[in-house]
Image (cartoon, grey):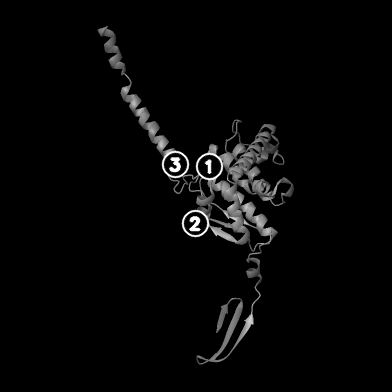
Amino acid sequence: NFEYSDGIMIIHCLKEGEILDSFEMPQHLELGQLQKNRKDDQQAITGVHESGHAVLTTVLMKSLPKVIYSVLSDAEQQGFTYSSYPWNYIARKEILPRVAVMLGGYAAEIVIFGNENLTAGASTDIELATEFLSDMYKKNGMGKETPVHYSISQLQDNAYHEINEVEEAIHSTIEKALNLALETLRQEKSFLLALSNYLADNRMIKKPGIKRIYQEKGSKQIDLIEQGDSLFYRRHLKEQVEKTREESINEPKMQDISMNKYKD
């Protein structure tokens, strides 16, 4: 019979249900060690980086992350912020804040540590932001250019990435998004610091804890979006239908216009 408690494996030798002997074996589990709070520079950096994503998700997207990690057992990834927006589409007006959220870790390190102490580690975020804008502008018709689709057979080495106007738009949007991220994080520095400090000492925080810190340290309280089933589109459609119906009722009929002509 085996039992495990506080890093020790307790082994009981039994015969017909009776314990004949017991002994203990200390267990040095690598996974457990990897998941422990380190409380070092790396955890502090990761705490700040992930808090940047979380603060901007809360403030710009009005949605709380579900969980944030500042320590992971993954050797290739130091931290992670998991967010899931309560709506299932991307509107044009969301593009800039979404990219700002993606660059939130990069911006947070600048705000907290200073530009000269910025660390390498935002490459994935920058890549995701660039690819996201590329898809929005080139495939989804969200840019200023007329939407056009090129088949791969018409291109060489993804030549559509060399369209200067679109590439300039991507660069411009990333610059605007980074400025938005920096400005927002400076305004919400108390929230950013409190969340970063918690994650520097604790390997994770879940949604209720994030909400508590936001309510205590946020510069302004935002109506967070919990349900995303009816935010704009259905209501706007119904309003347009009703407006058209009312206009149709109030519009003079051709027969009435003709009768009025003879009366005059």
Q: CA distance from mark 2 to mark 3?
A: 23 Å
- Quarter of image, res 152: top right
Q: From the image, tell me which residue sits under label 2.
A: 208
Is the residue marked by circle 3 packed among few (<14), some (14-19), or many (20+) residues within 10 Å? few
Q: Are marks 2 and 1 in contact (CB under 8 Å)?
A: no
Give the number of the disc on residue 90. 1
Residue 258 tag number: none
Give, as a three-letter code, the residue at label 1: Ile
Callout 2: SS: helix
How many residues crowd around disc 2 within 10 Å: few (fewer than 14), some, or many (20 or more)? few
Q: Count numbered badges in the picture.
A: 3
Q: Dot 1: few (<14), some (14–19), or many (≥20) neighbours within 10 Å?
A: few
Which residue sits furthest left?
Answer: 263
Q: Residue furthest right?
A: 116
Residue 47 in sight in this render? yes
Q: Position of residue 201 (x, y in %)?
A: 62, 61
Question: 214 or 71: which is nearer to us?
Answer: 214
Quarter-of-image position of residue 169: top right
Location of residue 159 in the rendering, given as x and y in whole percent from the top left corner = 70, 38
Foreground pick, 72 / 148: 72
Indicate whether 96 appears above or below 30. above
Using residue 250 as the reference point, say whether residue 73 is left or right of it: right
Where is residue 40 drawn, in percent x and y? Answer: 68, 61
Which of the two discs, 1 and 3, labels the residue nearer the N terminus? Answer: 1
Residue underneath mark 3: 231
Q: Secondary structure at mark 3?
A: loop
In the rendered image, residue 16, in percent from the top left (x then y), is placed at 50, 92
Label 1 vs label 3, nearer the camera: 3
Examine the rendering and report whether any part of residue 69 can be seen.
Answer: no
- Residue type of the residue flagged with mark 2: Pro
